[in-house]
Amino acid sequence: MAKTGDRDKEKSVTVLTDFNCMEEGCFGNVNTENPNTRMALTTGCSNQSMAYACDTCGRLHFGPETGVVDRADPPNKAFLKDGKLVKVPSAGKTGT
């Protein structure tokens, strides 16, 4: 069998583990394994990324230290409340 270059190389996969919520005043845990606290969000014209909610406050994160915000000015923070996306105005800092 002929080699096909880079397609034969093993792809690396990043696996997120649980991490602490970055929302100010919250000391909750973000459980990446729980299907009830994650949702796919559109992050571009045709791209989606998985977001994970804090078990305590519901703040959505793309990963540790990466809170979900929208493109509004100032940006809105994103939370998961009762299975729905809820936007809350932030203090104006992107990603916080």
Image (tube, rainbow, N blue to C red):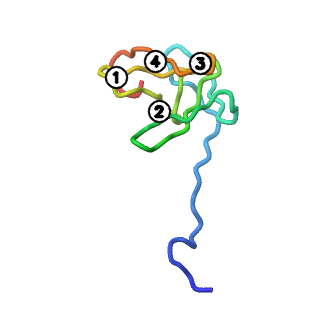
Q: Depth-wise, is mark 3 or mark 4 nearer the camera?
A: 4
Q: Quadrant of the N terminus?
A: bottom right
Q: Which label sits on residue 87?
A: 4
Q: Depth-wise, is mark 1 or mark 3 nearer the camera?
A: 1
Q: Which residue is mark 2?
A: 66
- The residue sitting at 44% across, 21% down in the picture is 77
Earlier-in-chain disc, 3 versus 4 = 3
Q: Does the residue at mark 4 contact the one at mark 2 (Cβ under 8 Å)?
A: no
| Residue extending furthest toward the front | 46
Q: Mark 3 and mark 4: span between their CA atoms? A: 20 Å
Report the number of discs: 4
Earlier-in-chain disc, 1 versus 3 = 3
Q: Which label sits on residue 27?
A: 3
Q: Does the residue at mark 1 contact the one at mark 2 (Cβ under 8 Å)?
A: no
Provide the secondary structure element on which disc 1 rests: loop
Q: Amino acid at mark 4?
A: Lys
Provide the secondary structure element on which disc 3 rests: loop
The quadrant in which residue 27 appears is: top right
Within-10-Å neighbours for mark 3: few <14, some 14–19, many 20+: some
Q: Mark 1 and mark 3: span between their CA atoms? A: 20 Å
Q: Mark 4 and mark 2: span between their CA atoms? A: 16 Å
Q: Amino acid at mark 1?
A: Lys
Q: Position of residue 86 (x, y in %)?
A: 50, 18
Q: Depth-wise, is mark 2 or mark 3 nearer the camera?
A: 2
Q: Amino acid at mark 3?
A: Phe
Q: Depth-wise, is mark 1 or mark 4 nearer the camera?
A: 4
Query: Looking at the image, which is closer to me, 77 or 95?
Result: 77
Within-10-Å neighbours for mark 2: few <14, some 14–19, many 20+: some
Q: Which residue is mark 1?
A: 93
